[in-house]
Image (cartoon, rainbow, N blue to C red):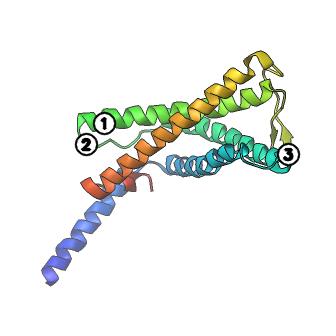
Amino acid sequence: MPARMTVEAEASSLQSVSVSSERYGSPARLLHWAVAILVLITWPLGLMIGFAKKDVVSAFYLLHESFGFLILWLMLLRVGYKLTSKAPKHEGSALERVAASGVHGLLYAFLVIMPVTGFLATNAHGFPLNWFGLVEVWSPIGKSPDIAWNLSAIHEWSAWILLALFALHIGAVLFHHMIKRDMTLYRIL
């Protein structure tokens, strides 16, 4: 029995060394979880706007738009960090690596497209962004009713695409953690 405990302790020690050397850097992990939490707040807020009473709709808009604008800046930081740092090597088959890269790339793209189109749509409808009620953000397009609905449609469709990508991402996390039982999840924790 003691020999088995020693082998398990050594294996655990080797895994923790392997995980720490193959983890994403602290900035990447912090940005990943900050964006994830903000999306999990912002997405339902946007959905709820259509169901909110008229006296609270503006508060829902303010929070949804403000969190969305924050997501945009965090994603720009995240893209910058990704371009200037080395990510850990992806494990798995070639198909898994291609799928992971594709889904991650699309997640990044839609996490930028969503807030940009939301910000521009709000501006085009004639409502400048007042970030958390503290700072009015300059409108690059101003009131433009002719494109406002197109931007709103892109924003809405992007939300559903992002939800599907999020589901794929979570499905892959569960697959790696519960079925393959590999260390993929621990790289971002």
145 or 51, which is in the foreground?
A: 51
Q: Which quarter of the picture shows residue 178?
A: bottom left
Is 146 located above or below residue 102 in the figure?
above
Q: Which residue is mark 1?
A: 97
The disc placed on residue 132 is none
Q: Label 2's element? A: loop
Q: Amino acid at mark 1?
A: Arg
The N terminus sits in image quarter: bottom left
Q: Is residue 92 left or right of residue 112?
A: left
Q: Is residue 166 above or below residue 177?
A: above
Q: Residue at x 55, y 39 (%)?
A: 78
Q: Position of residue 31 (x, y in %)?
A: 56, 47
Amino acid type, label 2: Gly
Q: CA distance from mark 1 to mark 2?
A: 6 Å
Q: Secondary structure at mark 3?
A: loop
Disc number placed over residue 134 in the picture, else none? 3
Tell me what residue is drawn at x 59 percent, y 50 percent: 40
* Residue beneath the point at 24% across and 73% down: 9
Number of other residues with Cα within 10 Å of mark 1, as a class: few under 14, some 14 to 19, many 20 or more = some
Callouts 1 and 2 close, C-beta under 8 Å: yes
Q: Is residue 26 above or below residue 75?
A: below
**Residue 61 is drawn in which quadrant?**
top right
Question: How far from the left and from the top, in percent, is residue 51?
Answer: 72, 47
Vertical side of 41 occupied by 107: above or below:
above
80 sits left or right of 90 in the view: right
Q: Label 2 neighbourhood size at 10 Å, few (<14), some (14-19), many (20+)? A: some
The image shows residue 124 at horizontal and vertical percentages of 78, 24
Q: Who's the residue at 64% across and 37% down the image? A: 72
In this rendering, would 55 be left or right of 162?
right
Pick whichever of labels 1 and 2 is earlier in the sequence: 2
Q: Which mark is residue 92?
A: 2
- Res 101 → quadrant: top left
